[in-house]
Every structure is written in structure tokens, then in C-alpha cells.
Amino acid sequence: MATKKVIKATPGKMIYHNMEFIDSDVGRPIRIIAEFMGPSLIFAEEGVKNTIVFFGSARTLPMSEILKRRKKCKNAKELERLKKLESVAEYYDAARELGAKLGRWANKQHKGFAIMTGGGPGIMEAGNRGANDVGTSSVGLNIKLPFEQHPNPYIDDELNLQFRYFFIRKYWFMKMAKALVVFPGGFGTLDEMFELLTLIQTKKYGDRMPVVIFGKKYWNKVINWKHLADTGMIDKDDLKLFHFCDSVDDAYNVITTALEKTME
């Protein structure tokens, strides 16, 4: 029978300096409060007041990277995976281009705008990369996971945040968000998108914000939006909570037009 580990006092030190205590089950409330309160100090210090948030898959690769990996790869399973990713490779380049274009717009506003992503690879990397290309503040909200998630190199060092808890990370996605772009993704992207749409639908989120769902062909295969409305699961007006866009220019115009109206 395993014995329960006892947290011992460290002579001469406060209990909250004991990392064994902080990392324990009883230390969880302290960890939660730290993740909830800490980012506000960082954002204030770095002058980040408003964000444009990018959601999307961590697995997406640009076509150039897929071709490079295919040349070196001899593993059949990996080659099959790369083949599947070819169909969504265009979205990496689109996310990078949109991040840069929105970044240039943000730079002219002098309103403390930043491009914010989940901080990992794929679409998240592309969004941060676009912001980094044009010198816009680039925020990454990383999450501690056993696979996939690692900080991409295009996040500003001072704005590279690490989270343990999904629910607090989601809070910070939404806290300063003025617009949202959802690129193709899997379970995590669906979770983030629907939570935010639910908050807007139920008026739990303060201001109505522009929400762009990028890649209509992909999303219409994943979700039967019309069926949700036809069966009364959502109101038809709920389909107006977001805009489908298939081009960077269209997404840019939807977002900036809406934001500029709020700043008039």
C-alpha cells in the first residue's frame, strides 16, 4: 500500500515559498489565483489593452514545410499524415498574411492592440508570425500538455505566457478580445469557438465583437450550421453572430470595419 507523501516545512521559509506545497493538491487554489491575476500585471506593463484572437489547429503546416518533410520522410504513417495536411496547408499562409495585415492596421491605431493566439505551432504560430513580421505585439497563451503544445518562436518574450488550466487560459483569450478569427482546427478549436459563441449568444460577453470563421468549405463539412437552425437548436439569427470568410482581404475588411465603428 502506497503511503501518502507528507509535505515538510522548510526551516526559515514561508510555506508559500515551498514549491512542493505549491505543486500539491492543497496548493491548487493558489496556482489558480496566480494564473488568474498574474497576466493582468504583464499586459499592463507591456501596454496590451486590446487583442485580436486567432484560433486554429496546432497541426497545420505551410505547404513549403510539408514538401520539405516529405522529401526526408521514409515513414509510411508520417507520409500519410502529411498527405492529409496538404488539404489545409493554405490556411497557415492565410493566417500569417492576415496576422500581418491586421498588425499593420493595429499599429496605426495607438490603442494597445496585439495579436493573441494559443501560443503553439500551426495556425497559432502563423498568427504570431504575421504579427512579428510587422512589429505588432504578439501574445501567446500556452497550455501545459503532454504533446503538441510548445511555444512558437514568434511570440514576444515578455508576452509568452504559460498556463496550467484551460479555463483560466480561456478567460484571458476573452478578457481583452475585440475580434476573433477561427481557422480550421480540431477538438480544441471547436471547444474555444463554441464557448465564445455561446457567451456572445447569451449576452454574457459584454460587447458584440466581429467573429470570422475562415474557410467555409472546411467548416461546412465539419458542422451542419443550417441543420442547427432548421431543427430549432439555435435561432436563425444566431447564424449572424459570425461571418464566413474565404479570403484574407474579406476577413480583414469585416474585422477592421467593425472595430473602426466602435472607435468612432
Image (cartoon, rainbow, N blue to C red):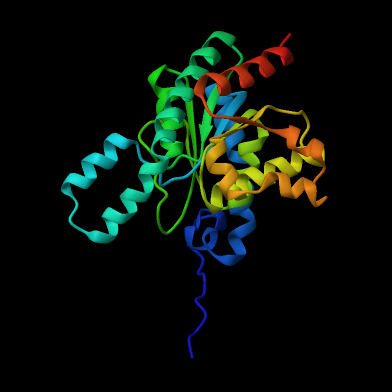
- Taking the image as shown, residue 166 lies to the left or right of residue 150, namely right
Nearest to the observer: residue 243 or residue 155: 243
* Tag count: 0
> Quadrant of residue 125 in the image?
top left
Q: Position of residue 19 (x, y in %)?
A: 48, 58
Where does the image place residue 26, in percent across and percent down from the top left? 61, 65
Q: Is residue 25 above or below residue 160?
A: below
Q: Which of 198 and 214 is in front in this view?
A: 214
Can residue 238 be seen here? yes
Indicate the position of residue 236 as horizontal and vertical percent values: 80, 39
Residue at image point 48% right, 63% down: 20
Q: Nearer the viewer, residue 253 or 263?
A: 253
Q: Residue visible at 33% across and 54% down?
A: 81
Question: In the displayed structure, does residue 241 sit left or right of residue 157?
Answer: right
Residue at far bottom of view:
1
Above or below, 196 against 128 in this view is below
x and y, in percent, of residue 181 in the image: 58, 32
Classify residue 112 as left or right of residue 82. right
Task: Name above or below for residue 146 compared with residue 217.
Answer: below
The quarter of the image holding the C terminus is top right
Q: Residue at x 52, y 70 (%)?
A: 7
Which residue is pictured at 51% across the width and 60% down the height? Answer: 23
Residue 35 in view here: no
